[in-house]
């Protein structure tokens, strides 16, 4: 009835304007918090609830929890504060997940209507003019600040539940599922997401769960390849998590053996190559695991392994003064690249010739092997694949341009020899 509607509006206004939002939410913890009608809510209402209630509660949590952590007065206070923390973060993660699902549904509907040549209307989220990306970034910043505190003291024993940590991390992974996350303008949001995940790994033993989730994302979404590669490199450079890369490679290789979709394998390959391009050094310990796949299908994994080796070769094994172990590793990579110029798959042969071009252009071929590179390029000109022939000719052109003995050659003498 009309009176009931007025009462509900006044009640909502009270909740949104009250300063003790976090405590208010904890008092309602006996209710079943399920987003039953979220998909039917207007974005104007969603934005108001998130900005005033959800984000407001996250910002208040730090001030509420800090004095309790510094000096826990009694057991009841600890349990009460822990319940406030759990309930507020549960509501945030649920609300955040539903908002992303609603956005994804509306985007997919718009694409379907466009495919049917229907006139598409401006998105409802756009009509609301709510800056969702910036708003959720503010929420994740609040989450990061919260986890920087010693919240472990609220548990007895002082170890947060794995389920609780995974629940919070899943919101970060949910944000990565959005197609626009790879856009340049989303860099601040991406960095914030990986800062939260990195903190959860370092302080709250989230490493194993993170590895599994990264592989799941790479299995399903192509657009996460570059963001995840940058995120993993950030984990290593800023947080020193070098062992995480080995775990990710091992999990990816295991998934490659079981996954049926060739697209997923391509996503795995692109991810590993991009990590190698960004930070070749961290991929060196993984090459022993990767070389096992040089003799196996799919061919895209062979291309991936050879590309990773090339990046390591160019950035770590091409300078002067290499020790014996480094020279041995360099020679092994060159031999493997040489072998795969005769790979059974034409795509691999083409890719290897492209890699040789890159190596020659960077003057990373030892002089003792230079004639060998010339011979393999000439041999591939006769390849049955026209694409391989094209790349072989391109390699010969690059060899002539970067010939280490070029200064000793006399053009007139060469011209005279051709006339004979």
Image (spheres, rainbow, N blue to C red):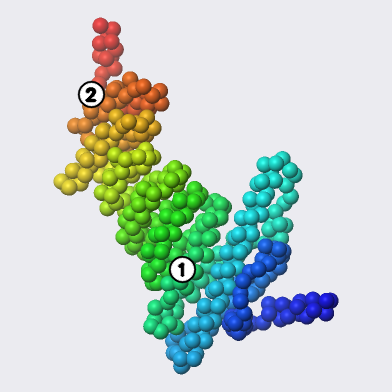
User: To which quarter of the image does residue 148 belong?
Assistant: bottom left
Q: For the N terminus, which image quadrant?
A: bottom right
Q: Where is residue 186 in the image (x, y as percent from the top left)?
A: 54, 56
- Name the outermost residue toward the right: 2
Tell me the residue at 30%/47% (across/down): 290
| For residue 143, side relative to residue 372 (left or right) | right
Q: In this view, does 10 lie above or below 215?
A: below
Determine the secondary structure under disc 1: helix
Residue hosting label 1: 166
Residue positioned 38% across, 65% down in the render = 207
Tell which of 336 and 242 is nearer to you. 336
Q: Residue furthest bottom?
A: 74
Count of numbered circles on the image: 2
> Front-most of 360 and 275?
275
Quarter of the image for residue 157 reads: bottom left
Q: Answer yes or no: is residue 314 visible.
A: no
Q: In this view, does 400 lie above or below 319?
A: above
Work out which quarter of the rendered image holds the C terminus and state it: top left
């Amino acid at each position: 009835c009309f009176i009931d509607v007025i009462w509900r509006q006044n009640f909502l206004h009270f909740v949104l304007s009250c300063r003790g939002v976090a405590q208010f939410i904890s008092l309602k913890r006996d209710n079943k918090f399920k987003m039953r009608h979220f998909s039917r809510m207007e974005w104007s209402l969603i934005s108001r609830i998130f900005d005033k209630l959800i984000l407001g509660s996250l910002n208040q949590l730090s001030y509420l929890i800090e004095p309790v952590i510094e000096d826990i007065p009694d057991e009841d206070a600890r349990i009460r504060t822990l319940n406030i923390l759990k309930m507020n973060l549960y509501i945030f993660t649920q609300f955040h997940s539903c908002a992303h699902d609603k956005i994804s549904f509306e985007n997919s509907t718009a694409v379907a209507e466009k495919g049917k040549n229907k006139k598409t209307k401006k998105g409802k989220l756009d009509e609301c003019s709510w800056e969702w990306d910036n708003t959720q970034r503010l929420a994740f910043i609040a989450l990061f600040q919260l986890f920087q505190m010693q919240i472990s003291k609220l548990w007895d024993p002082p170890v947060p539940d794995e389920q609780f940590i995974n629940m919070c991390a899943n919101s970060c992974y949910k944000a990565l599922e959005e197609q626009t996350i790879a856009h340049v303008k989303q860099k601040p949001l991406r960095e914030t997401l990986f800062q939260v995940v990195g903190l959860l790994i370092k302080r709250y033993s989230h490493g194993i769960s993170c590895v599994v989730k990264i592989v799941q994302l790479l299995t399903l979404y192509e657009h996460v390849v570059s963001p995840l590669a940058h995120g993993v490199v950030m984990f290593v450079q800023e947080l020193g998590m070098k062992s995480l890369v080995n775990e990710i490679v091992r999990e990816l290789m295991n998934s490659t053996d079981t996954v049926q979709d060739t697209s997923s394998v391509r996503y795995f390959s692109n991810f590993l190559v991009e990590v190698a391009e960004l930070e070749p050094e961290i991929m060196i310990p993984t090459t022993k695991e990767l070389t096992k796949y040089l003799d196996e299908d799919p061919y895209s994994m062979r291309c991936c392994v050879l590309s990773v080796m090339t990046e390591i070769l160019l950035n770590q094994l091409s300078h002067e003064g290499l020790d014996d172990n480094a020279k041995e590793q360099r020679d092994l990579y060159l031999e493997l690249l040489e072998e795969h110029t005769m790979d059974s798959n034409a795509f691999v042969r083409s890719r290897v010739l492209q890699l040789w071009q890159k190596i020659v252009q960077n003057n990373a071929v030892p002089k003792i092997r230079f004639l060998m590179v010339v011979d393999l390029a000439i041999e591939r000109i006769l390849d049955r694949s026209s694409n391989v022939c094209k790349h072989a000719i391109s390699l010969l052109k690059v060899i002539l341009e970067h010939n280490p003995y070029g200064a000793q050659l006399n053009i007139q003498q060469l011209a005279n020899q051709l006339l004979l």
